[in-house]
Amino acid sequence: MSAIVRKARHGDEEGIHNSHMTSIQEVCSKDYTPEQIAAWGGRSFNLDQKRNLIDNHHVWVVESDGKVEGYGLLFVSESQFEIGGLYFTPKVLGLGLGKKIIDEMKVVAKSLGAKEIFLSSTKTSKKFYEKQGFHQYDEDDVSMIGGVPVEGHPMKISV
Ligand SMILES: CC(C)(COP(=O)(O)OP(=O)(O)OC[C@H]1O[C@@H](n2cnc3c(N)ncnc32)[C@H](O)[C@@H]1OP(=O)(O)O)[C@@H](O)C(=O)NCCC(=O)NCCS
């Protein structure tokens, strides 16, 4: 399996969306109910929203055989740094590329003056984030996605 990590560019929008939905449907599905997966992993594609992320935040993609198989998003707003997503399809799991994107996020955040990076982790990936040095700092949170509550773990790391 050969796969690379690179910064996202225009043209990646649909691949980012599709890999995100596939990851929820095929990886997170073991930790959430079918109702949660249907709402969370069945959202429709919005080109402008994805393009705004690429243009105004920091987005990485995993590319394999010319196809986007995963992405990572670092939101930067008013000196707050938050990982807004890190989702891979089964095809590129376990290759060290999640760690690689987190390491790149840490470098970028630090260069922009970050002291901490925040995120809300899925149940599925809490152990992955712990391995990268994050810890849970508050009680579990709940996001409403497509009218359905989806639980997460608020986590952070000092950089
Ligand atoms: C999060 C995610 C992108 C991590 O991707 P990955 O590329 O497979 O992880 P890596 O290969 O970089 O793993 C890095 C280390 O974490 C460990 N690790 C990865 N996933 C793990 C898990 N679920 N539980 C425990 N350890 C895990 C690996 O064994 C590896 O350990 P090592 O450094 O000792 O070798 C992937 O698991 C994923 O897509 N999850 C589903 C989507 C999701 O829930 N995303 C989180 C959104 S907040």
Image: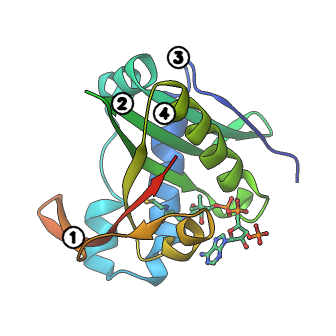
Considering only vertical position in the picture, is 87 above or below 126? above
Asked if the residue at tag 1 contacts the one at tag 2, i.e. Cβ–Cβ closer than 8 Å, the answer is: no
Give coordinates of residue 35: x percent, y percent: 25, 76
Which mark is nearer the camera, 2 or 3?
2
Local SS, label 1: strand
Mark 3 and ligand 1: say if the CB distance to the nearest ligand atom is below 8 Å. Answer: no
Classify the position of ligand 1 by quadrant: top left, top right, bottom left or bottom right. bottom right
Give coordinates of residue 10: x percent, y percent: 52, 16
Mark 1, residue position: 141
Q: Could you tell me the amino acid type at mark 1?
A: Asp
Q: CA distance from mark 1 to mark 3?
A: 33 Å
Q: Could you tell me the amino acid type at mark 2?
A: Val
Pointer 3 local density, CA inside 10 Å: few below 14, some 14–19, many at least 20: few
Which mark sits nearer the N-terminus, 2 or 3? 3
Mark 3, residue position: 10
Q: Which mark is residue 76?
A: 2
Q: Is residue 59 left or right of residue 75?
A: right
Q: CA distance from mark 2 to mark 3?
A: 19 Å
Residue 111 falls in image quadrant: top right
Pointer 2 local density, CA inside 10 Å: few below 14, some 14–19, many at least 20: some
Q: Is residue 62 left or right of residue 15?
A: right
Q: What residue lies at 54% left-to-right and 65% top-to-bottom?
A: 129
Q: CA distance from mark 1 to mark 4?
A: 28 Å
Q: Which mark is residue 14?
A: 4
